[in-house]
């Protein structure tokens, strides 16, 4: 057996197939907390009964790092034993009658650096219970299918903790002896333990009273630390918009009198959907034009929406077990994506959002699906559930829901959701239950006729590839398109069955006109864009009445999470880039041209590629540059769309396309292409910069944000061009803009243009930025991240990162700060991280080990940075393998990190 940390349960994998209903139900939970940072006392009084459907057995309650003082059954002492971390009670009352179980424990919130369970952040108590944090508060059946009614009494020092919050409604409060006070909360809804929350501290709230469409009054509150109230307006607006949207789009109303959001600066992830008391990372609450960028504003809207939407998809209907996590996460991501699109408004802004989401999927989820941590949307086993809050569960899960939406249509999907709530409200269910409800509400749909094969999306890991070949026959005026699918083996799944893949497609003439599509056998042509369903290994489509060889536009809107292989000519791609009516595929054509150029030159170029020297290679051809110039100048396109189209594919995405990756060559070629784009379009960038200046007050809407994004890209291109030509005009203008900026987006854009071009003016600008914002933690995170993520010049970033870790404002214990320095370097700066002297990897392994002792969840995320080590060329591959091995040999690892490194090493086995 593997060596384990003291007191930690052995790392055995939990199997989905081993699910058993609980032997006991907990109907009510009355909790009383005496809050003290060093030693908090918890009295947990539960009403339990046997589950008559399960054979009688002992009651085994989960607990972790608790001090147990007393156990009473119906008010009397009882025998119990410990089995590892579990409290086992064998002598419980016989029969079906309910009984009371009281458990007294204490825990130490101040010592809780894992930020799971009850912890203290800046003098305020917070909880985080998903997935298994409740067991760090009290002994419990800590599993999502045990849903109970909760009441909570909080007692604490009134001066230190004036605000006492928990789930549901405040039913009583008052003063106690010795300067203490209490509050009693009752949650009217049953919930699983992972949705429990409490907060206690010095907080202030922005309040808003609203009346829902249904006519019910509600109180909305956003709690923050005193001093941050001025930064809560956008979060409150986002919450109000989310409530209105869920009512309008899905008929789902707020089921609570009071809905609270509380922000903390110490949080392992983005936010948490505790019933009625969402706890958020400050990053996704606090915003002012001076401190938050457009991206921050958009993220706040989306995360506030996401957590709010969980109130129905996750809380009212929850997961039977953690293998069903995507039941709530995939569906809720789909809902927040749709919310953001509906808020953005125009078709073009919707396409921008779709492109952004697909970019995340391709740069993070596709690599996960091809690496050692590959798992199905509904995994079959895990060691540590916290390792499975992944882009596969979330983003690929959302794509699976989106495909159902495509297959049944928007109205059909709404009917499916209605049926889902009719059948399962108040219950803990499975992904199968969800798919069945959508299908049953749409008996004649493409989904329902193929439901079983469709559900392979839940069961099979890996990204399918669809290979498309077209053939035009001038004699019969027909065009045949053959689509063939395959999917590579993933760990534990050597062979895959065909997936059900909706492919939205169109055909363009060579000069870019959309053709009405007429399939063989149809009497008349239909729409110019249609969806076909690929469900076999190979299918051939035949289009008739086609006058000349067309250019196919496939997988429009990215209608399925697959890789599309198709042998386009450059001319085909230029046609699609100039004319495709599908905005997604228009962008995609541009990306394909750029990717093709990168891959060709990565293969052809010899090292080293000079990033700063004179151009020896013209990587981008003149027709491609001209096409990009046309996009930049096109008056019909939105600025945000242009910004996406003119941004090169990321190094991570380029690397994924290669069999063997030389990260330095990927970096060098991409930087070279960027510089070429900067120089060749210099006058166009200047035009774009000048044309997209906004004066007037800051508005975070999609149009204004798009203009700022494009002018920011233009400025960084102009600084890059200046770096090549050696002139200082644009760096000087960037510095001026940095100083004069009326909002953080412009200020940050100017600063990153200077840092990105490596100009001497970057240093004084960074110093000024620090002086301006040294009391704004979220802005300081940006300051750290910008430096740790800067383009590498002769290996300067790693020493800088080490220096930043010595900065008085750096703290490894604060996840946001750790992410801003360490993750920005190890996970988001491949050119600087993949050093040929292996120093980046050694640094990484040291940090994983160091962080693991503090916060295993955060450490395990960092441990994923070298997931794709097997693809690396030498000497990186061997060095990466050694660095992972260095972590794996430790005897004191958490289960979290051990699972990640064990899987990474196992993937090297033949
Ligand atoms: N459900 C939480 C994530 C909990 C992560 C636990 N390690 C936030 C969300 O997805 O909305
Ligand atoms: Zn979620």
Image (cartoon, grey):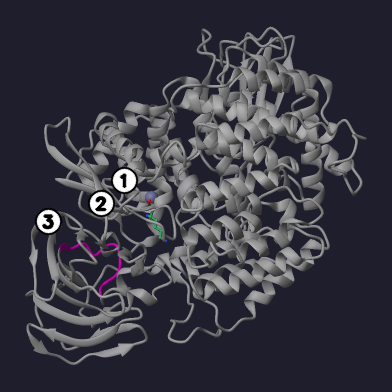
Give x and y (percent) for residue 199: 26, 61
In the image, residue 26 above or below residue 868: below
Between label 1 and label 3, give the one nearer the viewer. Answer: 1
Q: Which residue is mark 3?
A: 170
The chief SS type of the magenta part is loop
Q: Nearer the viewer, residue 767 or 837?
A: 767
Image quadrant containing the N terminus: bottom right
Determine the CA span between mark 1 and mark 2: 7 Å
Image quadrant containing the C terminus: bottom right
Q: Which mark is residue 229?
A: 1
Callout 1 touching callout 2 (CB < 8 Å):
yes
Q: Which residue is mark 2?
A: 204
Q: Regarding mark 1 in the picture, which secondary structure is present there?
A: helix
Whichever of labels 2 and 3 marks the residue nearer the N terminus, that label is 3
Asked whether residue 429 is drawn in magenta, I would say no
Query: What is the crowding at mark 2: few (fewer than 14 residues within 10 Å), some, or many (at least 20)?
Result: some
Residue bounds of the magenta highlight: 140-150
């Amino acid at each position: 057996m593997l060596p384990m940390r003291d007191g930690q349960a052995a790392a055995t994998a939990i199997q989905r197939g081993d699910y058993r209903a609980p032997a006991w139900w907990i109907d009510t939970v009355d909790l009383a907390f005496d809050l003290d940072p060093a030693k908090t006392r918890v009295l947990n009084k539960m009403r339990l009964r046997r589950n008559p459907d399960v054979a009688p057995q002992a009651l085994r309650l989960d607990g972790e790092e608790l001090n147990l003082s007393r156990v009473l059954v119906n008010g009397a002492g009882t025998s119990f034993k410990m089995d590892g971390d579990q409290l086992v009670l064998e002598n419980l009352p016989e029969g079906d009658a309910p009984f009371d179980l009281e458990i007294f424990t204490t825990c130490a919130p101040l010592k809780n650096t894992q930020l799971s369970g009850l912890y203290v952040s800046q003098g305020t108590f917070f909880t985080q219970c998903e997935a298994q944090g409740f067991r760090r508060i009290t002994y419990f059946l800590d599993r999502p299918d045990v849903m109970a009614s909760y009441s909570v009494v909080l007692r604490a020092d009134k001066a230190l903790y004036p605000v006492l919050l928990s789930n549901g409604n405040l039913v009583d409060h008052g003063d106690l002896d010795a300067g203490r006070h209490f509050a009693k909360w009752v949650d009217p809804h049953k919930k699983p333990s992972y949705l429990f929350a409490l907060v206690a501290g010095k907080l202030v709230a922005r309040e808003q009273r609203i009346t829902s469409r249904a006519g019910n009054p509600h109180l909305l509150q956003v709690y923050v630390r005193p001093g941050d109230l001025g930064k809560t307006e956008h979060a409150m607006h986002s919450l109000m918009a989310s409530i209105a949207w869920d009512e309008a789009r899905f008929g789902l109303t707020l089921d609570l009198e009071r809905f609270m959001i509380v922000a903390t600066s110490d949080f392992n992830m983005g936010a948490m959907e505790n019933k009625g008391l969402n706890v958020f990372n400050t990053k996704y609450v606090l915003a002012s034009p001076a401190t938050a960028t457009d991206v921050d504003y958009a993220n706040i809207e989306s995360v506030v929406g996401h957590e709010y939407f969980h109130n129905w998809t996750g809380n009212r209907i929850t997961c039977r077990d953690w293998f069903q996590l995507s039941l709530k996460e995939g569906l809720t991501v789909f809902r927040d994506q749709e919310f953001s699109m509906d808020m953005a408004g125009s078709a073009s802004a919707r396409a921008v959002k779709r492109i952004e989401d697909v970019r995340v999927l391709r740069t993070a989820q596709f690599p996960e699906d091809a690496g050692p941590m590959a798992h199905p949307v509904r995994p079959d086993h895990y060691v540590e559930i916290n390792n499975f809050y992944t882009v596969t569960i979330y983003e690929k899960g959302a794509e699976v829901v989106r495909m159902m939406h495509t297959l049944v249509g928007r109205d059909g999907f709404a009917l499916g959701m209605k049926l889902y709530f009719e059948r399962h409200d108040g219950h803990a269910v499975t992904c199968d239950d969800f798919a069945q409800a959508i299908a049953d509400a749409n008996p004649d749909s493409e989904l329902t006729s193929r439901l079983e094969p469709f559900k392979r999306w839940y069961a099979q890991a890996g990204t399918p590839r669809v290979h498309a070949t077209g053939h035009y026959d001038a004699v019969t005026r027909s065009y045949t398109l053959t689509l063939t699918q395959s999917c590579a083996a993933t760990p534990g799944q050597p062979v895959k069955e065909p997936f059900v893949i909706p492919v939205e497609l169109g055909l363009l003439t060579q000069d870019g006109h959309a053709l009405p599509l007429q399939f063989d056998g149809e009497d008349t042509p239909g729409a110019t864009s249609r969806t076909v369903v690929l469900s076999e290994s190979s299918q051939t489509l035949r289009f008739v009445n086609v006058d000349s060889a067309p250019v196919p536009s496939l997988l429009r809107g990215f209608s399925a999470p697959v890789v599309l292989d198709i042998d386009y000519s450059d001319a085909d791609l230029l046609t699609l880039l100039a004319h495709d009516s599908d905005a997604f595929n228009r962008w995609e054509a541009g990306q394909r041209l750029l990717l093709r150029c990168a891959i060709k030159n990565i293969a052809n170029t010899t090292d080293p590629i000079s990033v700063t020297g004179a151009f020896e290679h013209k990587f981008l051809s003149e027709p491609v540059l001209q096409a990009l110039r046309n996009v930049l100048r096109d008056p019909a396109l939105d600025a945000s769309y242009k910004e996406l189209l003119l941004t090169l594919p990321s190094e991570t995405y380029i690397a994924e396309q290669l069999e063997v990756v030389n990260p330095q060559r990927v970096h060098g070629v991409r930087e070279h292409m960027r510089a070429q784009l900067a120089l060749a379009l210099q006058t166009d960038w200047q035009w774009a910069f000048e044309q997209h200046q906004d004066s007037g007050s800051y508005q975070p809407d999609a149009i204004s944000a798009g203009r700022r994004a494009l002018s920011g890209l233009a400025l960084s291109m102009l600084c890059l061009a200046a770096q090549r030509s050696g002139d200082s005009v644009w760096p000087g203008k960037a510095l001026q803009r940095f100083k004069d900026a009326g909002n953080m987006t412009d200020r940050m854009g100017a600063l990153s243009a200077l840092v990105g071009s490596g100009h001497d003016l970057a240093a004084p600008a960074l110093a000024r930025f620090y002086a301006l914002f040294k009391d704004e933690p979220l802005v300081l995170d940006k300051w750290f991240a910008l430096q740790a993520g800067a383009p590498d010049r002769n290996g300067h970033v790693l020493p800088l990162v080490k220096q930043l870790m010595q900065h008085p404002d750096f703290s490894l214990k604060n996840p946001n700060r750790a992410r801003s320095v360490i993750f920005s370097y190890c996970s988001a700066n491949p050119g600087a991280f993949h050093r040929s002297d292996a120093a980046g990897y050694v640094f990484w392994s040291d940090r994983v080990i160091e962080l693991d002792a503090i916060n295993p969840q955060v450490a395990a995320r960092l441990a994923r940075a070298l997931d794709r080590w097997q693809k690396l060329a030498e000497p990186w591959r061997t060095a990466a393998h050694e660095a992972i091995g260095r972590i794996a040999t430790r005897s004191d690892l958490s289960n979290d990190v051990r699972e990640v490194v064990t899987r990474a090493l196992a993937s090297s086995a033949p």
